[in-house]
Amino acid sequence: MKSAGSLVIVGTGIKAVAHITIEAAGHVQDSDKLYYLVADPVTEHWLRSQNASAEGLNSCYADRKPRMDSYNEMIDRMLTSVREGKRVCAAFYGHPGIFVYPSHEAVRRAREEGYDAAMLPGISAEDCLFADLLIDPAQHGCASFEATDFLLFNREFDERSGLVLWQVGLVGERDFRAGGYRQKGLTVLIERLLETYPVSQELTLYEAAQYPVCDPRIDVTTLEHIERQKITPITTLYIPPLARAKADERIVHRLNSVLSAP
Amino acid sequence: MAQPGSKKLADFLMKLGNDSKLLNDFKRDPEGTMNAATLSDDEKNVVKSGDPAKIRAAISGDSIEGDVVVVVVVVIAA
């Protein structure tokens, strides 16, 4: 038999309040305890107006505190309420399952302890990028990596597809820094990209719009000039396909023969 | 600057987020829509700036410099 408490993780999207799904709003309003970790005060204002139990998880962060310690503290807070038998909702910025460690881990541990736990999709920064840059990933394919992960593990990718690199302003950073990040790791990222792309490679620095009265940041530059641009913790790098892919004739013949067979 | 912790500004932006008619009104006539929402001149200037850092600062009451977007990242076990 399932235990009384439960956990549902929802996303608030990127553009304040506008991106919250009807499904997510229902859980925000209906839960016994609401936790949140969001990037803007309008969303925070909305969450607090919807549920009197709302409590921010931002206080788990501290300057120079290892991120992992902060994440474990967030998970502990959520699970403590679940163990008290409460129906807990936790709202995270963007899509709650993309670039969010504590949400996945909280669901995993809650299920392990016998509680109902689920994650609902939200609108991610990548969803906004596809819409704002008018990119259809079905057309040429698109690879997406966290920038530090991309470097550390020497990720292989196809330059004939689009390449999305997240958190290019945080390359190599392990700790939360209240005063901003140093961006020293960007040089290493550029060196890696120059192994594949020419210095003149066009690319886009992208930041989704956070409010209905703001425009998204869409700055087109080149690899050569990227270090002159403003890079923030939410800047994403998009590199369009370098060349067109050609269909593999062997696969074309093989598919034709398989599909035409009775 | 707008008054620190501008609830009126937060309410206005919240409504723009889920009321497409109001958003269309704002796009057509920003000044009139902000006046109808009784925003102060400072609040209107923050909205006109289109700068998310200024908007966050005006609503939260934090300084722009100290205002850091919360970023949650994946854990990399190297």
Image (cartoon, helix red, strand yellow):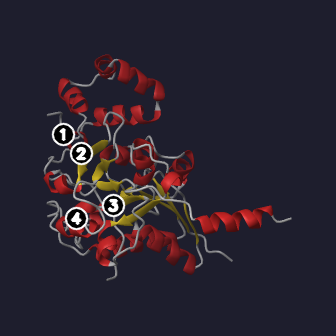
Q: Is residue A190 visible?
A: yes
Left or right: A95 as drawn, with respect to A257: left
Residue highlighted by disc 3: A166
Tell me if mark 4 has few (under 14), some (14-19) or many (20+) residues whose alpha carbon lies within 10 angstroms of its own: some
Judging by the rendered image, the residue that carries numbered circle 1 is B4
Q: Amino acid type of disc 3?
A: Trp
Amino acid type, residue under disc 1 in the picture: Pro
Q: Are marks 1 and 2 in contact (CB under 8 Å)?
A: yes
Q: Are marks 2 and 4 on the same chain?
A: no
* Identity of the residue drawn at 40% across and 52% down: A125
Q: Are marks 2 and 4 in contact (CB under 8 Å)?
A: no
Q: Nearer the viewer, residue B6 or A124?
A: A124
Q: Secondary structure at mark 1?
A: loop
Q: Residue at x 63, y 67 (%)?
A: A251
Which of the numbered marks, if any, corresponds to residue A190? 4
Cα–Cα gap, marks 1 and 2: 7 Å
Q: Chain for mark 4?
A: A
Read off the chain for label 3: A
How far apart marks 1 and 3 lie (CA) works out to: 32 Å
Amino acid bearing label 4: Ile
- Amino acid of disc 2: Ser
**Camera-side residue of A165 and A241:** A241
Tell whether A261 sits left or right of A214. right
Query: Which is nearer the eye, A72 or A123?
Result: A123
Report, in whole angstroms, how far the alpha carbon at label 3 lies from the one at label 4.
14 Å
Q: CA distance from mark 2 to mark 3?
A: 27 Å
Q: Are marks 2 and 3 in contact (CB under 8 Å)?
A: no
Residue where numbered disc 2 is placed: B60
